[in-house]
Amino acid sequence: MFKKILIANRGEIACRVIKTARKMGISTVAIYSDADAHALHVRMADEAVHIGPPPANQSYIVIDKVMEAIRKTGAEAVHPGYGFLSENPKFAQALEREGVIFVGPPVGAIEAMGDKITSKKIAQEAGVSTVPGYMGLIGDAEEAVKISREVGYPVMIKASAGGGGKGMRIAWSDEEAREGFQSSKNEAASSFGDDRIFIEKFVTQPRHIEIQVLCDSHGNGIYLGERECSIQRRNQKVVEEAPSPFLDAATRKAMGEQAVALAKAVGYASAGTVEFIVDGQKNFYFLEMNTRLQVEHPVTELITGVDLVEQMIRVASGEPLSITQDDVKLIGWAIENRLYAEDPYRNFLPSTGRLTRYRPPAEIAAGPLLKNGKWQGEAPAGDAAVRNDTGVFEGGEISIYYDPMIAKLCTWAPTRAEAIEAMRVALDSFEVEGIGHNLPFLSAVMDHPRFVSGDITTAFIAEEYPEGFTGVTLASDDLRRIAAACAAMHRVAEIRRTRVSGRMDNHERKVGTDWVVTLQGDRHDVTIAADHDGSTVTFADGQALRVTSDWTPGASLARLDVNGETVVLKATKITGGFRIRTRGADIKVHVRTPRQAELALLMPEKLPPDTSKMLLCPMPGLIVKINVAEGDEVQEGQALCTVEAMKMENILRAERKGVVTKINAAPGDSMGVDAVIMEFE
Amino acid sequence: MKDILTELENRRKGARLGGGQARIDAQHGRGKLTARERIELLLDEGSFEEFDMFVTHRCTDFGMEKQKPAGDGVVTGWGTINGRQVYVFAQDFTVLGGSVSATHAAKICKIMDMAMQNGAPVIGINDSGGARIQEGVDSLAGYGEVFQRNIMASGVVPQISMIMGPCAGGAVYSPAMTDFIFMVKDSSYMFVTGPDVVKTVTNELVTAEELGGASTHTKKSSVADAAFENDVEALAEVRRLVDFLPLNNRQKPPVRPFFDDPERIEESLDTLIPQNPNQPYDMKELILKIADEGDFFEIQEDFAKNIITGFIRLEGRSVGVVANQPMVLAGVLDIDSARKAARFVRFCDCFDIPLLTLVDVPGFLPGTTQEYNGVIKHGAKLLFAYGEATVPKVTVITRKAYGGAYVVMASKHLRADINYAWPTSEVAVMGAKGATEIIHRADLGDPEKIAKHAKDYEDRFANPFVAAERGFIDEVIQPRSTRKRVARTFASLRNKQGQMPWKKHDNIPL
């Protein structure tokens, strides 16, 4: 076994690999750019080598610099993680030349699978199901109809040179094929000056399901079940799970065996992933093979108990696989949610800055992984695991230079429903402040009935959130639980206030039992009966909710038990109540005495100012330049001003035509997020 | 006998109705609560003891003898806030527009006298059209009596003014002399002369809101210490403030149970200071991470943002915080920030509230605007305030502490008790670049030499150790342990006896 490996990556995956290497007694070398000098992977590694400026193309993906770091530290092997150099055959070759082991497949396999057309050809030859279609040129409409019939409807008629949906038609019948061919051809000719057309099967209700394979250099290969990655936003995976709620054992076996056949066909030796597109009838078609460790590999690890990084290292060192296909059993269910530094309320705009608070939920070891690949029997019901793969820490900086993914939160439980529930609680317990992040969106997906049902396709996000994400409106049961929790919490906080020193003896304030809770426009009149163990909150209609918690005033996270249900709230004090974040919702909850509530009703409702005619500062930054003057007429897309944030200049442009009426900032001013820079007519 | 009791109840009922239901409805229509409703929200439920409910004015001119409403436009008395005694008056706009008569003023004076004698804060709720013109000089005399009591009470009991409606003309000078002024957005304004007079005299066209609304006074004039969305929020927040304040100048600040570990370590503070010395960071993060439960009551949040002032608790005890804010103007001291902080420091010293000062200051803001407007004397206010303060003073330098501003910001030389520095701090006369250009003026033409000199200067002075060698810094501490160190240090200073030589009063450069 190797004594020292270098991890040619950063972030969570570098940390992930270091953990396994450490477990195996292998010392680790990290590489880092200027932006990562204090990064977690650097802190965790035994050694760290600086390799250049922040942009990846000047550091992490410069082969010479990585080679230099290898030479300097004497690392015997390199784990490339994912992305960066992980599928770069030149890197693998460079390592080979210097006798350094690449923890990944042979160069030939990388090359063969790196090309879409070659890989599809090889797949076909290996007996892997590929999307049926006709790659040759099609002469006329009648030929198109003939081919369409052969492929089977529906079909997609596509321009060879196509892109962006142009020159693309879906046909469900001969008639549509005939018309589609003609219009695609015309459109292709006018848009691309190239009217070549081809036809392939149109996959309906597509799901993205991939097979994890593991091969050694002794000709052994196995598959470790599948992962379903259909929840994607613009081809970026957001939620993954294993197994897929859709596959049956037969389909799984067929896909798995084809995947292994493909891997063997290219002499694969490492962990790899064969991606398929699966239609509503469980027909599956090969998409591509990723010749590296996938981001979402933890879900496979959680249900199989196999440490894929360990297996990759063992295979790379020449060991034969110690697991046979019969050893592979899929136990329970695992779900992964990717936490991105992207603001869901701002159309998932990447957010950068300092993590002023970063408290992931506590990791809980359970399930197959606990037994390190040697699980026995079924996991007990109610058992659940939480795993968080992360590369950041509280007080760390999210920079603009790299992938905005900051953590992969995984849960495992015996059933899918339990795994989802564990994920909901874990997401609610995850505290991230200082940057925008997609936790609310993830919570929303975990509560979405369609996700819960498992009836998902790759179009899930586009279909369910066509206008983007605007927040969550909680169901009335949830609101009641929150109302009860907040009433109990508020009462505790108020009692603490009465314990202040300097009060008049025998004339202390008595905290009452009747409260009015308002949230999301609803009013709940409640009575609290508190005892030593908790509070019973009774609503006007007689419903009583028992609230117990170890929450103390001022704590930012409240874990409560409300009538047996676990409720986790992020609670920030606001005047007369709390700002509560839970289950993707972000709401203000006011808890008042009946008299306070009565008087509060008299307060005018102040509408937030109409910001549609204002230019708001999108991030905290410094105004570098103002390009327009008051009275100027601006056109859509015209540059209005430049804001520098995180050393990057951001040009803010007019969203529509208008006249500048007022400019509130001058170059050199530092502006907070949402500060009004200028106003329009 | 029964008749007499009924009579009392009827009279009370009448008095409680103030100016009548129609005017109450009108008050509500403006988004404002009535005087009695405000008192209800300000005080603990059922704790209000009202005085002088049946007082009426004695004016007989201009037909005033025909309208003598009970209470005369102001509700006065005392009650408790979380069980602690406070005196309160609330002007009742529904009664003769809350105008101030001799008797109205006398009612206010009465509770102020009691507050002084019994050692409890005074909270005044202002909602008044101004002097009762029909009374003429009697009304003015009334104001004068209140003013004099504001002055006598200053530094003896905390005085808080809430502006919850109009407050114009001479009336503004009573709140002006109290410790804190809070306003309500969109429904309160205060000015010496109103928009009409302004137009006549200076031809300026300005609305009441622009001239003296909450935004003006919290952002531009600094007359107000904070503004709140509505009456309900304003009253709740004043209750929250009172929880931080002692009842009088002979009592210790309040202590309340806390649920935060005084030894809490905040590892993230180790990375608060950016690598680049010119890059800003948010000092509020440090304040929130030092404070018990992250609870911070900020004073003058919207004015002179280059300095932060407000109250936190450490181990349940009130502490006043003054901190440079590198996010705004690099945290420089200037006229506004010096005035803002000086007044806050003096308030804390009046009422025995210990002071925590967090320093990252590159110096004083240069420029003609500053000099012409007297930055010398205004800057001196903060220096003076720190130097005269005898309360426990603990200082933490996080980064820059340059020049005179270093001395001003609660340095050891101004009798600060314990001065800590983070390893990232630089205590020096100025930054390396500026210093090099002066010391090595001869080499100015040679960028290489200058760069080397600058490096030498940085190595020598851009650290806390030169100051520590001299004992100006008591200890260099890990950022992560700041809360623990500061909390323990304040604990060690609880019995501090600060002394000033006998004097009638000092002569701070006003």
Image (cartoon, coloured by chain):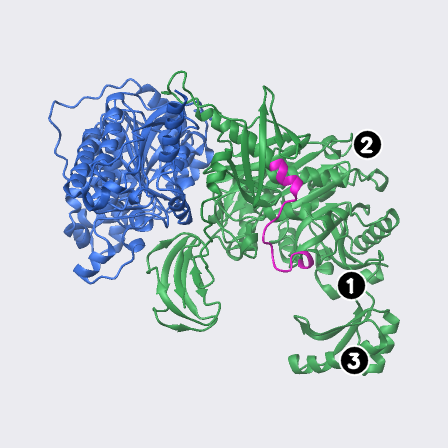
Chain colours: A green, B blue
- Residue B23 located left or right of residue A412: left
Q: Chain of mark 1?
A: A
- How crowded pointer 3 is (Cα within 10 Å; few <14, some 14-19, many 20+) is rated as some
Residue picked out by circle 2: A378
- Mark closer to the chain start, 3 or 2: 3
- How crowded pointer 1 is (Cα within 10 Å; few <14, some 14-19, many 20+) is rated as many
User: Split into 4 quadrants, where in the image is the N terminus of chain B?
Assistant: top left
Local SS, label 3: helix
Q: Chain of mark 2?
A: A
Residue picked out by circle 3: A179
At label 2, the amino acid type is Glu
Residue picked out by circle 1: A120
Q: Chain of mark 3?
A: A
* The image quarter in which residue A194 lies: bottom right
Local SS, label 1: helix
The mark lying in front, picked from 3 and 1, is 3
Relative to A73, does residue A128 appear above or below in the rendering? below
- Mark closer to the chain start, 2 or 1: 1
Relative to A129, does residue B344 appear above or below in the rendering? above
Q: Where does the magenta region start and end? A: A462-482
- Residue B398 located left or right of residue A2: left
Q: Which of these two is toward me, A243 or B423?
A: A243
Could you say where residue B209 lies in the image, as x and y percent from the top left? 31, 54
- How crowded pointer 2 is (Cα within 10 Å; few <14, some 14-19, many 20+) is rated as few
Could you say where residue A396 lies in the image, as x and y percent from the top left? 48, 42
Q: Are marks 3 and 1 on the same chain?
A: yes
Does the magenta segment cover residue A630? no
